[in-house]
């Protein structure tokens, strides 16, 4: 049996594979790496993502705000928005194009499905 060791969640995401094994993965700059399973990230956001929205066709995504505030917008409700603060969360349905905007520095937990997904370039 493997040892239980500490993992720095500020440096790593956690990949939960279809067989329910979990592996930490060091975060890298650029678009997220996608796996056949779910990725759990605990991230500090100081600025908007370098894209104009994203979509996850393999399943729903959970967003949970630990601290700070974000705005979530989505394509199926043009003009609609959801403001989330500490302790609040939402579920982004499978296939929904959405964008997260940072209103103040935010610590966010996301549980994101894979392996597929797409993002729109900034215009």
Image (cartoon, rainbow, N blue to C red):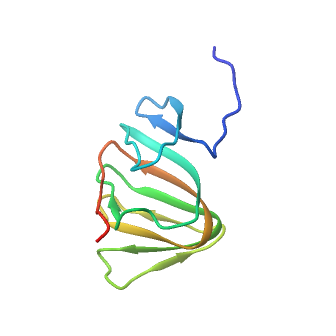
The residue most toward the top is 1
- The residue closer to the viewer here, 67 or 122, is 122
Placement of 28 over or under 97, stated as above or below: above
Image location of residue 97, percent across then percent down:
31, 66
Left or right, residue 2 beside residue 97: right
Q: Is residue 65 above or below residue 21?
A: below
Residue 45 sits in quarter: bottom right
82 left or right of 4 in image: left
Q: Position of residue 19 (x, y in %)?
A: 43, 28
Q: Position of residue 12 (x, y in %)?
A: 57, 40
Q: Residue at x 38, y 38 (%)?
A: 35
Q: Quadrant of the N terminus?
A: top right
Residue at (39% x, 56% y) in the render: 60
Q: Which of the 4 quarters of the picture holds residue 72?
A: bottom left
Question: Where on the picture, by quarter, is residue 26?
Answer: top right
Measured from the top left, where is residue 117 in percent x and y?
30, 51
- The residue drawn where x is 32% and y is 80% is 77
87 vs 51, left or right, is: right
Q: Residue at x 51, y 61 (%)?
A: 63
């Amino acid at each position: 049996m493997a040892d239980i060791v500490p993992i720095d969640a500020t440096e790593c995401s956690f990949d939960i594979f279809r067989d329910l094994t979990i592996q930490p993965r060091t975060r890298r700059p650029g678009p997220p790496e996608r796996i056949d399973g779910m990725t759990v990230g605990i991230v500090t956001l100081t600025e908007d993502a370098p894209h104009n929205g994203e979509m996850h066709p393999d399943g729903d995504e959970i967003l949970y705000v630990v601290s700070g505030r974000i705005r979530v917008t989505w394509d199926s409700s043009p003009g609609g928005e959801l403001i989330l603060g500490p302790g609040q969360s939402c579920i982004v349905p499978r296939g929904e194009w959405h964008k997260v905007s940072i209103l103040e520095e935010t610590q966010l937990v996301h549980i994101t499905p894979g392996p597929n997904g797409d993002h729109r370039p900034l215009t």
